[in-house]
Image: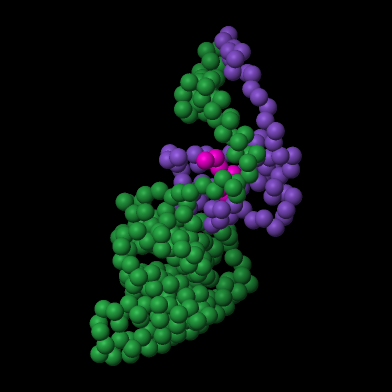
Amino acid sequence: MIRKPMKLRKRRTYIRRKTCRFCADSTLVITYKDPKTLRYFTTERGKIIPRRISGNCAKHQRKLTLAIKRARHIALLPFVTTDF
Amino acid sequence: MTMRGYETVVIARADMKDDSLEDFRKKLLQIIEREGGILRGIEDWGKKRLAYEIRRHRKGNYLLFNYAGEEGLTTELERNLKIDERSLKYMTIRIEDSLDEEAVEAAKQQQDELMKKLAAEAEKKAESAAAPTAKIAIPAVPETGASEEGPGDEGEEKAAPAEAVEAEGVEAGETVEGESGELEPEMGEGNAAAEEETTGEVDSDESDPEIEEAAEEEVTEEEQEAGEVDSDEPEPEADAVKEEDK
């Protein structure tokens, strides 16, 4: 049996928000048409930020992911940004 | 047959003239009508910068159609969008699985109101388009006279309350000011009506510093560990392979 090498297990646990931004404020709507809000949840490179860092609840993270992917399809958000 | 609610976003070429864009819009509306669809809303987001190149274009004209239709409508619409060279990209989303009779009636009423509004806007456009042509008819100096008309048109058309007219007026003003390829600096100079997002720029002031930093540090740490740029993928794959070996 090959176990995962020990060095990969050691990972800093990052502070993350305790509450889901969308659960707390029920007026925020997740829609693919609003790249400004969606961009909060992507890295500079354009990658979607994982839930354990963004603090979203599962339901909203799923909706968010769907919205981001739709926005990418419509060129409101990039797939990848390489320029710095 | 069930009526379903759809929403289609179309990215049209940005280098079209306004009347070509109008034709394109009308053509799509005709298709919706022809196939027995009910139009519930149209939005024109105007020219926006694209987050990535599409067919060598960097800007596009965004149109949104909100409609309800039966089977075959979307297929027909998309078929036409695919063939037409004026559309760069399109995306259709299903909003409602089925509309019951009430909803269908409500949608039809929405459509009637919408059609009236569009007709009214079209009339206003025709009026304000007629007026400037009267001005140009004056046998003044040709070139400078035309450029003076530009801001004049803009002022006139901005006075009209309808949004569509405003957008068209601003666009006309922009094209008169400079036919150069780079519209971005002009757009950026605070044209409130047509304020577009330059999606290429990232405003680090606005974004949540916590989230950004955490995410970035995570990425770089992974890079150091795995020694590769995108280390997200190799790790789970490696795990899966190792588990299979067991």
Query: How many numbered callouts?
Result: 0
Quick check: A20 left or right of B24?
Answer: right
Outermost residue to the top:
A1
Query: Does the stretch in magenta take in B18?
Result: no
Query: What scheme was used to colour the molecule?
Result: by chain
> Where is B28 relative to A32, above or below?
below
The chain that appears purple in the image is: A
Residue B81 visible to the viewer: no
Q: Residue at x 32, y 70 (%)?
A: B17
> Range of the magenta residues?
A38-44
Residue B171, percent from left and from top: 40, 70
Residue B18, percent from left and from top: 35, 72
Quick check: B49 left or right of A26?
Answer: left
Q: Residue at x 51, y 78 (%)?
A: B162
B226 vs B186, nearest the viewer: B186
Task: Determine the main secondary structure of the stretch shown in magenta.
Answer: loop
Please name the color used to draw chain B: green
A17 vs B185, nearest the viewer: B185
Quadrant of the image occupied by residue B209: top right
Quick check: B74 left or right of B40?
Answer: left
> Where is B217 relative to B142, above or below?
above
Q: Residue at x 52, y 22 (%)?
A: B224
Q: Residue at x 54, y 53 (%)?
A: A35
Residue B91, percent from left and from top: 45, 55
> Where is B142 relative to A72, above or below?
below
Residue A28, percent from left and from top: 67, 55
Query: Does the stretch in magenta take in A42?
Result: yes
Q: Quadrant of the C terminus of chain B?
A: top right
Quadrant of the image occupied by residue B80: bottom left
> Where is B178 relative to A73, above or below?
below
Residue B187 visible to the viewer: yes
